[in-house]
Amino acid sequence: MSSSTYDRNNHTLTDIFSLEEEDLTIGSGAGVGLEKIGLVRYIVDDELVARKISIKNSSKLNEFIETIRNRFEISPNTKTELYYIDDENDFVIVSFEDEFSLALKSSASPKFELINKSNSLDKISQRLTTIKNQSTLFKEAKRNIKELEVEVKKILSNTKEAKKNERPIKARIIYPESLRRGGTVDTYYEVVFKSSFLTLKCVHSSSLNPIYGTGIYTDDSDLLKALIHSKPIKLSEDPPPYNILATIKILGTQSHYIGSYSNGLHSRDYGVWSNSFQIEDYVCSSPEKDTIYTSKNFVQQA
């Protein structure tokens, strides 16, 4: 009797019998019409034991299983399942005659393993656990992908918004210089309002041009009055300790301009006018401290 060592699932394969030493023949007439030499494995006392067998293509499944059970002295109370081991070492359960016949025809030296049903259930349980873990990983990956998609959308949205907010400034003018008539639509100007003009007396001076519209003004409207009318800037009799830098957008023709009363100033109605503007935002700079205040901070300090 020859033997060798073979490791599978932490079991040791021993007691491998040659055909001559262990003539286990399946089919009618032992040793007659030998078709194949195969191998059957079974775990005995936590060891994986193998037997070489001679088998005919005409062998029957029940006869095969019964012979194997007898050879391995398996108790009648022990439930087993037969598996065919294919060329890729995958275990294929064999429960019917056609499956057994197909297994015999699939290999010149077919290999089988008889497994206790409890072990089989363990294998299934392990497989289900693996599938469950893989499913969990897949769901987590899918969730991470969705979160990443949200972040990418935010970045793209912010990028679009940033591009939208990009305002190429055409020129900077210093009040009381006025806008040039007939400016290009959707261009921007920066207008500096020095502290000396930011007083109630100056804003209400009769020498200033009237303003037409609310929010959007005709381009011949006075810039200082439009600034005070459209933005919540509080003035006093004395000049504040800062200048104002406003961003003005040039707009096109408006069909009408609606007057209103806002921040202590009246604006007038007007009909069609070819050019217009609106004051989008402003900042206040402090020459003494060399700092910049947003319009919100400026209102809080005023």
Image (cartoon, rainbow, N blue to C red):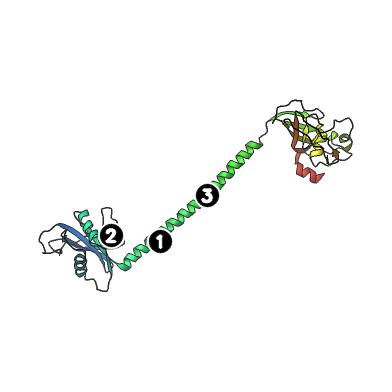
Residue position marked by numbered label 1 in the rendering: 129
Q: Is residue 193 left or right of residue 54?
A: right
The local secondary structure at tag 3 comes to helix
Q: Is residue 31 left or right of residue 257?
A: left
Q: Is residue 287 visible?
A: no
Instruction: Judge depth for marks 2 and 1 and give the one in front.
Output: 1
- x 40%, y 59%: residue: 130
Q: Nearer the viewer, residue 235 or 95?
A: 95
Q: Quadrant of residue 19?
A: bottom left
Q: Quadrant of residue 172?
A: top right
Figure check: 86 above or below 47: above
Q: Is residue 202 left or right of residue 1?
A: right
Figure check: 184 above or below 293: above
Name the kind of residue labelled 1 in the image. Answer: Thr
Q: CA distance from mark 3 to mark 1?
A: 25 Å
Q: Earlier in the sequence, mark 3 or mark 2?
A: 2
Name the kind of residue labelled 3 in the image. Answer: Lys
Name the kind of residue labelled 2 in the image. Answer: Asp
Q: Quadrant of residue 30?
A: bottom left
Q: CA distance from mark 2 to mark 1?
A: 24 Å
Residue position marked by numbered label 2 in the rendering: 7
Q: CA distance from mark 3 to mark 2?
A: 44 Å
